[in-house]
Image (tube, coloured by chain):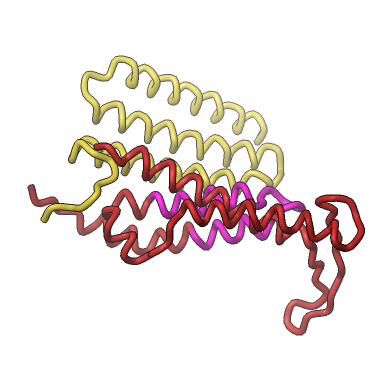
Chain colours: A red, B yellow
């Protein structure tokens, strides 16, 4: 049966980028405002789920040729690796530090190493959620 | 005065959510229930906006955006399930 969903597909092409931008904003707003790696990862994966809903799996996999199980594994490896990096500098496991740098455009910016840990958490959440959605829809 | 108006609007929004819950329980067909779920999402967004005005804070504005996104995706998923019988397709046949 042919399906007429031109409006849905056109809206999705716009809305996916808005959701991705909001996910990155939530990810960067962490640890001072509501936000952080987990919620940012959930919003990013909801954008991917919207793509999988509106288009089909093969089209999206052709556009994003990423194995999401490997994304989750790389995320966990990254998060543990930042914890081990603190051990390498002689501190406790998962110790975080921050420093205020003077950047050209942004002015005085506080850069914290917990951002690297949050990148790992976000990658893990994205990989896990998309893997769950794809494996639930597998047997239909 | 403004507090009383906002509290009254919260009560009215709660009544609207209750009516939508009745429609979900009784609803004769699946599209009625999907539409009632969407109404609940919109009413939740409105009530969070009223609450953030009432408490004079900006901390809940992200919640509004996330509820909007999730309600949108949920409605699309239900509509596609009604239309196609499957939510995520392996390969669309056209």
Q: How many discs mark residues in the rendered view?
A: 0
| Residue A25 lies in the magenta stretch | yes
Q: Which residues are magenta?
A: A20-49
Which residue is pictured at 86% across the width and 60% down the height? A97
Q: Residue furthest left?
A: A1
Location of residue A113 (image quadrant): bottom right
| Residue A92 lies in the magenta stretch | no
Which residue is pictured at 64% across the width and 42% down the height? B53
Q: Is residue A131 above or below residue B27?
A: below
* Main secondary structure found in the magenta portion: helix
Location of residue B33 (image quadrant): top left
Which residue is pictured at 29% across the width and 45% down the height? B88
* Residue A18 location (% of width, % of height): 46, 61
* Residue A106 location (% of width, % of height): 74, 77
Quadrant in which the C terminus of chain A appears: top left
Does residue B64 appear left or right of residue A59 in this picture?
Answer: right
Does residue A120 appear left or right of residue A18 in this picture?
Answer: right
Q: Is residue A81 above or below residue A125?
A: below
Give the camera-side residue of B58 and B11.
Answer: B58
Q: Residue furthest bottom?
A: A104
Give the camera-side residue of A10 and B57.
Answer: A10
Give the camera-side residue of A18 and B16.
Answer: A18
* Residue A100 location (% of width, % of height): 86, 70
* Residue A64 location (% of width, % of height): 39, 64
Give the camera-side residue of B72 and A101.
Answer: A101
Which residue is pictured at 31% across the width and 33% down the height? B35
Does residue A66 appear left or right of residue B75 in this picture?
Answer: right
């Amino acid at each position: 049966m042919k399906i007429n969903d031109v409006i849905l597909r056109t809206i999705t092409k716009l809305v996916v980028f808005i959701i991705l931008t909001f996910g990155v904003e939530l990810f960067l707003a962490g640890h001072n405002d509501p936000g952080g790696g987990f919620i940012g990862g959930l919003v990013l994966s909801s954008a991917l789920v919207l793509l999988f809903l509106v288009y089909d799996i093969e089209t999206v996999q052709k556009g994003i040729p990423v194995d999401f199980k490997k994304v989750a594994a790389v995320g966990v490896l990254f998060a543990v690796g930042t914890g081990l990096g603190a051990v390498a500098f002689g501190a406790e496991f998962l110790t975080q530090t921050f420093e205020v740098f003077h950047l050209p455009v942004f002015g005085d910016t506080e850069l914290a190493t917990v951002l690297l840990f949050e990148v790992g958490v976000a990658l893990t959440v994205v990989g896990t959620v998309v893997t769950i959605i794809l494996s639930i829809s597998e047997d239909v | 005065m403004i507090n009383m108006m906002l509290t009254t609007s919260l009560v009215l929004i709660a009544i609207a959510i209750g009516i939508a819950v009745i429609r979900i329980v009784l609803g004769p067909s699946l599209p009625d229930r999907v539409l009632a779920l969407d109404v609940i999402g919109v009413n939740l967004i409105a009530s969070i906006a009223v609450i953030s005005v009432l408490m004079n804070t900006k901390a809940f504005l992200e919640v509004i955006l996330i509820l909007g996104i999730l309600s949108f995706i949920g409605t699309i998923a239900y509509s596609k399930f009604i239309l196609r019988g499957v939510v995520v397709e392996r390969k669309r046949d056209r």
